Amino acid sequence: MNFRQLEQITPESSFWDVRDQLKWHIYHRSERAFAAGDAVRDQIRTPEDLKSYQQRLRTFFLDALGGLPSSDTPLEAQTVGEVKGDGFRIEKIIFQSRPRHYVTANLYLPDSLSAPSAAVLFVCGHWSQGKQAPEYQQVCQTLALTGLIVLAQDPIGQGERFSYYEPSLGRVTVGECCPDHDQAGAQCVPLGDVLARYFLHDSMRALDYLISRPEVDPQRIGITGNSGGGTQSSLMMIADTRLAAAAPATFVMNRQTYMYTGGAQDAEQIWHGFTAAGYDHEDILLGMAPKPVRVLAVTYDFFPIEGTRRTVERCQRIWNACGGENNLDLVEDVSGHSYTPKLQRAAADFFAQRLLGREAQIDESRIRIYEPSELWCTRSGQVRGEMEGAAFVFEANLERAKALEERRRAIPVTERRERARSWLRERVFAHRAPCRQNLRLYYTGMADDLTAELGLWWSQTDLLNHGCLLRHHERADETLPVTIALWDGGTNSLQSHGEWIRRTCRNGRAVLVLDVSGTGVLQPHSLHSAYHPEEFYGVIHKLSDDLTWLDDSLCALRVYDVLRTLEVIGEWRGVRADDLHLYADGRSGIYGRLAAALEPKIRRVEIAGGLRAFADLLSERHYESRGVKSILLRGALRHFDLPELEDERYHHL
């Protein structure tokens, strides 16, 4: 047998189905958190209970996002053009939500205005065209023909705000919309941030802009949007008390039903620790209670309608108890995922009644869909195409990383390292359930001139780890020191590391090639076959995000796996634990490097490749995204970067 053949042997063939264990570990933890959250919400019985709960929710939520950028800077709003519609006009607006962060927007002003009136902030879903998408033009015009002022703005990565548009190429280098969001969003995580902080801040500044307009009554502003616009509506419903009414569309559900669909979401839709704290989509609605809220949904959505119905039904009790008996309802359409004409009319009726105090009267024959370029606020159609010095999330992350580095360097090295290790230990050991490891060998044989043993052991009560122990056949009867090897692919990648394995074994060491949770033979079954497991929207992305909701990370869990592996060494025959080395190659090597920072019994760490520093990940506009979700450690840069943990045991090859 050779390495290629050895890679084909798996526990499923003779012992245990291990590939679903990581998924069920996460799902069972999530279910416990969902139940705990329901129990807390069930205790809300009075307006005072609700007010106290809302305050705790907002404080937690904003902190979980990483806080918000300053809103003290001038908007520097410009009206750069106008389009005349039938019954309304559309002003083309550019404002700066933060210095050099340009937001492009269309302001729909009804011709009938004679005094300050009600307005609606329209936030766009995941159409690459943003505010120019035909579906969204139709929503905005429907609302404007109802007599409502409407501000429709482009989100980050959409419309005229593609973060990765290159003027010299005339195209994007990272796909617009979801790829754009995930590319920037992953770089937020080591800073302790969530991409949603920027989406939310843009919407809050849009509200600032609406309030600045003399045509707008600041006491009568609502919000709506579907899909990703439903996400942005939800962010505002939790965080901004200035809203008078909300109609989130095709997003509100609950975490439980969506978790079981197997779908991933993009970066601004992942809110760190939200589930662990007991919060769910009910809290999106409760953020507004008992103000008027109309939830809009479609029955064929990939956001399960069952979750939507449950969420609205459970919240109805709280509206009734807190003086808003008729202020919460659900309107459904039989359709796939879209802001359908029926939902558009339902939103118009809702805002007309709640903000204008009358029934909606709409002449749909006056609606006209414009060519995207007619609604552009920039000449080229892209902010990066012409706005000198324009900044995006990438630039914001660089600034925050620099500030954190300066703050860290102000702390003496020894103290900084101790603080870093203390924080890291807390993150690695939080949420873990240690147990007896019970090493099981399920295969023993030869791979060329090396003896090979394949084994499983428990890292936690419901998670098995896996490894392949190799030694030279001439040393089969000796008790050898061990080098633990961590690389991408684990025991499925023996061939590509064969030269190093043989050399290490010839030099008198045993090699334990480790599969931490979700790697090698433990790789989860794909939930959506269109995506490689390690790519954005693959199964590792999805499960990593599920852990993020639980105030955890796949990186921290896998570092714990490495530490548990050090304990199981003593159960393996013919090896000793008093001379442990660690070999780290590729991105997976980070788990060993972090484990060694916590465990002095690792006497030598050899680093052959992989991420040098978290700062390197943030410094590149274009980085290798495959596998990035599994190495992110939220907030690490607030405490350390990887080189700052290293001591004399670490050797870069």
Image (cartoon, grey):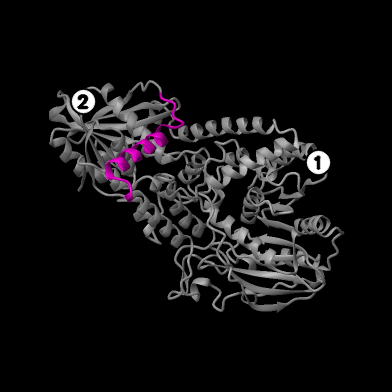
Q: Where is the N terminus found, in terms of image quarters?
A: top left
Across and down, in percent, residue 202 comes to 58, 60
Q: Dot 1, how many residues are within 10 Å of its Cα: few (below 14), some (14-19), or many (20+)?
A: some
Q: Name the chief secondary structure element in magenta.
A: helix
- Residue occupied by mark 1: 323
528, above or below 399, in the image:
above
Residue for point 70% across, 57% down = 223
636, above or below 211, in the image:
above
Amino acid type at mark 2: Val
Q: Quadrant of residue 215?
A: bottom right
Q: In which quarter of the image is residue 152?
A: bottom right
| Left or right: where 135 falls relative to 449 | right
Q: Is there CB contact under 8 Å for labels 1 and 2?
A: no
Across and down, in percent, residue 521 comes to 38, 36
Instruction: Assess whether residue 482 is covered by the magenta stretch.
Output: no
Q: What stretch is highlighted in magenta?
A: 409-434
595, above or below 530, in the image:
above
Identify the element where label 2 is drawn.
Answer: strand
Residue for point 48% across, 47% down = 538
| Left or right: where 554 falls relative to 246 | left
119, above or below 83, in the image:
above
Across and down, in percent, residue 354 comes to 81, 55
User: Is 251 or 488 nearer to us in this picture?
Assistant: 251
Residue for point 69% across, 48% down = 300
Q: Distance between the residues labelled 1 and 2?
A: 70 Å
Instruction: Assess whether residue 433 is covered by the magenta stretch.
Output: yes
- Residue occupied by mark 2: 575
| Left or right: where 636 falls relative to 347 | left
User: Is 215 or 436 nearer to us in this picture?
Assistant: 215
Identify the element where label 1 is drawn.
Answer: loop
